Amino acid sequence: MPVPIDIVWVVHATDEIRVTDPAEFIGSAIASQRLRVALPSVALNQAGFNQQAATLQSDSDLRQILELHPRLVIFSKVLGAPELIMQLERHVQLARALHSAQIPALVDICDNPYLGFAAHYVQQLIALSTHVTVNSPAMADMITSHPGINLSIINDPVEGIRHTPHFKPPRHSYLKKLLRFAKPQQFKILWFGGPLRSFESLRFSLPILHTLAKRLPVDLHLVSAPFPEIQTEIDRINGFGSTNLNARFTRWSRLALAEALEKTDLVFLPGEAGNPEKMGVSTNRLTESIWAGRVVVANGMPSYWHLKEGAFIGDDLASSIKQVLRNPAHALQRIKVGQKIVAEHYTPDSVGKAWRTLCTELINR
C-alpha cells in the first residue's frame, strides 16, 4: 500500500527534471531550490513528514499531484522565463484545484511579485494560497498589499561550514617604501553570484577596484556560472596591461566556492539597493561569507540590513573598503558579531524549525 504523502513540493524547472525527493535539490545551481526546497525538506523529513517533489511539465503531472491527495502543497519559487508559460498556467490550474478541494497551498515568494514575465501568474497564486512565505521583511511589506493574505517570514538558511574569523590584509602602499625589496602582497577580493544580473552590479562597481589597485595590488576572483559576459569582462580587465589589478574566473560549485572563500581576504557584493527588481535578493551570499569567517563589503540590499553589525553594508563601497583596511581589528570583530547573528537566525536548524512549525499548523488546521 502506498505511503500517504503529507507534502508535495512543486518545483519550477527549466529542464526535464524527474526528481521525487525534494532533498535531492541540494545540488542545484539555483539557490532557491537549495535553500527553500532541499534544506527545509530535510528538516520536515526529520519531523516525520512524507514528502514528494513534482514539476508541472505536462497535464499528467498536474493530475498525478491531485491523485496523491497531499495534505499540503508548497509552490516553490517561480522562474520567469517566457518559454515556461505552460508550466506557469498549470501552477495556477493546480492552485485552483487545491482551493476547490480545500487542500492547503503554501506559496513561497522570493522575487518581486509585481515585476517580470511571471508576475501575472504569481499574483494569481498568492490570491489562491492558504499561506505565503517570504525571505525578508522587505518582501513581506510588498505582499501585505494583497488583502486577507496570511504571511510568514522565513529566512534563507546559511550554507557552508563555520570557520574562525580571519582578516589579515596586505600592507598599505605607504609601507612599501620601507619594504621596497619585499614582494608586494595581493589583496584578494572574491565576488560570487548566480544570475547574470548580479554580475551587472559588479561590473558597474569595477571603477572602485581600479582605484583601489592604485594603492595595492588586487586579485579579483569571480565564481559563477560560465556566462560569456563574465569572461569578456575578465579579458577586458586583464587586457589593460596593469599588474595591479588582475581578474580570474572559476566555475561555480559548492566545493569551488568553499575553497575560494577560504583563500580570499574580502568578499565584495555590490548591488542595486534601490532597484525594485532586486527587492527579493537573498541573504545567502552574505551569510555564507560571514559564516566562512570572511569580511564582507556590500551595498544595502533590503534583506542585508538585519546583518549590518556583522559586515560593512552601505551605499559607499569605496569608503567601506578603506575602513576595513584602516582598522583590521574592527573588521575582524564585525565578522565575529555577524557569526553570532547567523548562528541565531540563519542556521538550517533554526530555519528548519520555522518550516516545521508552519507546515504543522497548515496541515492540522
Image (cartoon, grey):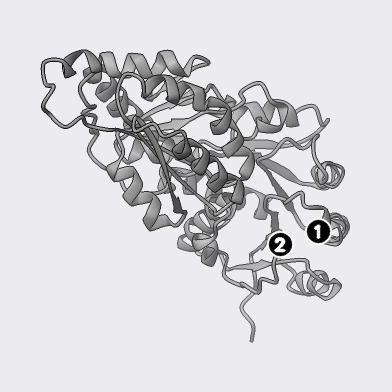
Q: Give the image location of residue 233, x and y in percent.
A: 54, 40
Q: Quadrant of residue 83?
A: bottom right
Quadrant of the snapshot with the N terminus: bottom right
Q: Residues within 10 Å of mark 2 (few under 14, many from 20)?
A: some
Residue 261, numbered circle: none
Q: Looking at the image, how many numbered discs can be counted on the residues?
A: 2
Q: Give the image location of residue 7, x and y in percent.
A: 64, 62
Q: CA distance from mark 1 to mark 2?
A: 7 Å
In the rendered image, the vertical position of residue 328 relative to residue 87, given as above or below: above
Q: Give the image location of residue 171, x and y in percent.
A: 20, 22
For numbered disc 2, what is the local secondary structure?
loop
Q: Residue at x 52, y 67 (%)?
A: 24
Of the pair 27 and 135, the residue shown nearer to us:
27
* Between discs 1 and 2, the one toward the N terminus: 2
For numbered disc 1, what is the local secondary structure?
helix
In the rendered image, the vertical position of residue 230 relative to residue 177, given as above or below: below
The residue identified by callout 1 is: 84
Residue type of the residue flagged with mark 2: Thr
Q: Residue at x 53, y 48 (%)?
A: 231
Of the pair 342 and 296, the residue shown nearer to us:
296
The reply to whether dot 1 and dot 2 touch (C-beta < 8 Å) is yes
Would residue 91 be seen by someone viewing this image from the given angle?
A: no
Q: Residues within 10 Å of mark 1 (few under 14, many from 20)?
A: some
Of the pair 141 and 287, the residue shown nearer to us:
287
Would residue 190 be seen by someone viewing this image from the given angle?
A: yes
Of the pair 9 and 169, the residue shown nearer to us:
169
Q: Quadrant of residue 330?
A: top left
The residue identified by callout 2 is: 14
